[in-house]
């Protein structure tokens, strides 16, 4: 099978990162988590005196999307490096704006081949996302996400994978989730028209079932097309 690229869209809290992690081994891909990548740049102690970083950090922490030109310039080289190393990529959280899509999709087409790119959109309502958000813990060290409803131990403090400490992301407070939802509708939706015009299909998948069930659906979509 050729090198594939999977791009996962989805409302905040729809489980994009969880799916990307579950699919990485199945398809032998590198996971590119844009949110986490940007977070690591914006909170990099070495870069805190850069005005651009300070401005972008404010946007990020408020739930607004980062400036598309900033995002593209930070991630373009990283994407190229991964493709050149011979791996396919699974993206969670990128592209988020039409501008980013216009800059990144042609690049991805060039390295992956148009027929090897798969678009998935995970669908969840705002109400459901807020509910699920209360259930989510993220390990500070390995990034493992734990959904409390699938875990029988109460008040778990440490990550069952690496023993690291759980934290709640700045982005996971209810007010911020509302802003992120609005941003998704206003700024990410226009990408779908752009993709349609380029001849792509975005496969919509209900994000409410258990994560493994959603993965099985995504695998089915991809394997039926390859
Ligand atoms: Zn961990």
Image: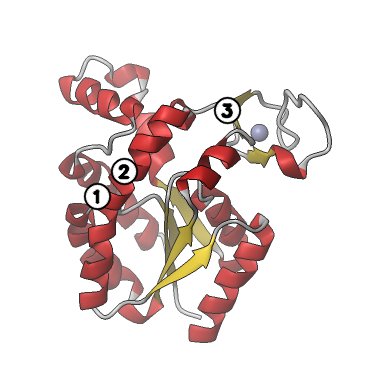
In this picture, residue 148 sits left or right of residue 14: right
The picture places residue 154, in percent across and down from the top left corner, at 80, 28
Q: Marks 3 and 2, Cα distance to the nearest angstrom?
A: 27 Å
Q: Which residue is mark 2?
A: 182
Tag 2 secondary structure: helix
Q: Residue at x 32, y 27 (%)?
A: 62
The mark lying in front, picked from 3 and 2, is 2
Identify which residue is drawn at 24% across, 42% down: 71
Left or right relative to 217: residue 184: left
User: In the rendering, at what x and y percent does residue 212 appear?
Assistant: 68, 60
Q: State the separation of the CA atoms marked 3 and 1.
A: 30 Å
Q: Is residue 176 visible?
A: yes
Seen at 72% across and 38% down, the residue is 161
Q: Secondary structure at mark 3?
A: loop
For mark 1, give the secondary structure. helix
Callout 3 touching callout 2 (CB < 8 Å): no
Residue 203 position (above or below residue 52): below
Q: Which residue is identified by label 3?
A: 140
Residue bearing the label numbered 1: 186
Q: Is residue 206 above or below residue 68?
A: below
- Give neighbour class at mark 2: few <14, some 14-19, many 20+ (Cα, 10 Å): some
Viewer-proximal residue, 143 or 135? 135
State yes or no: discs 1 and 2 in contact (Cβ < 8 Å).
yes
């Amino acid at each position: 099978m050729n090198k594939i690229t999977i791009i996962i869209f989805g409302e905040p809290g729809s489980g994009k990162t969880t799916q990307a992690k579950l699919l990485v081994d199945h398809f032998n891909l590198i996971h590119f988590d844009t949110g986490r990548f940007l977070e690591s740049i914006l909170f990099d102690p070495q870069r805190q005196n850069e005005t651009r970083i300070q401005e972008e950090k404010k946007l990020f922490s408020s739930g607004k999307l980062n400036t598309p030109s900033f995002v593209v310039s930070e991630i373009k080289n990283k994407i190229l490096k991964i493709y050149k190393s011979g791996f396919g990529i699974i993206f969670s959280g990128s592209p988020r704006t039409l501008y980013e899509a216009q800059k990144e999709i042609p690049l991805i087409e060039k390295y992956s081949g148009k027929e090897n790119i798969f678009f998935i959109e995970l669908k969840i309502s705002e109400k459901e996302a807020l509910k699920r958000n209360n259930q989510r813990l993220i390990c500070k060290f390995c990034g493992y996400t734990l959904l409390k409803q699938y875990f029988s131990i109460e008040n778990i403090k440490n990550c069952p994978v690496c023993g690291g400490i759980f934290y709640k992301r700045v982005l996971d407070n209810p007010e911020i989730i509302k802003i992120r939802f609005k941003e998704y509708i206003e700024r990410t939706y226009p990408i779908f028209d752009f993709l349609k015009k380029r001849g792509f299909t975005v496969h919509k998948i209900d994000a409410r079932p258990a994560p493994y069930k959603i993965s099985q659906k995504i695998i089915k979509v991809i394997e039926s097309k390859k």
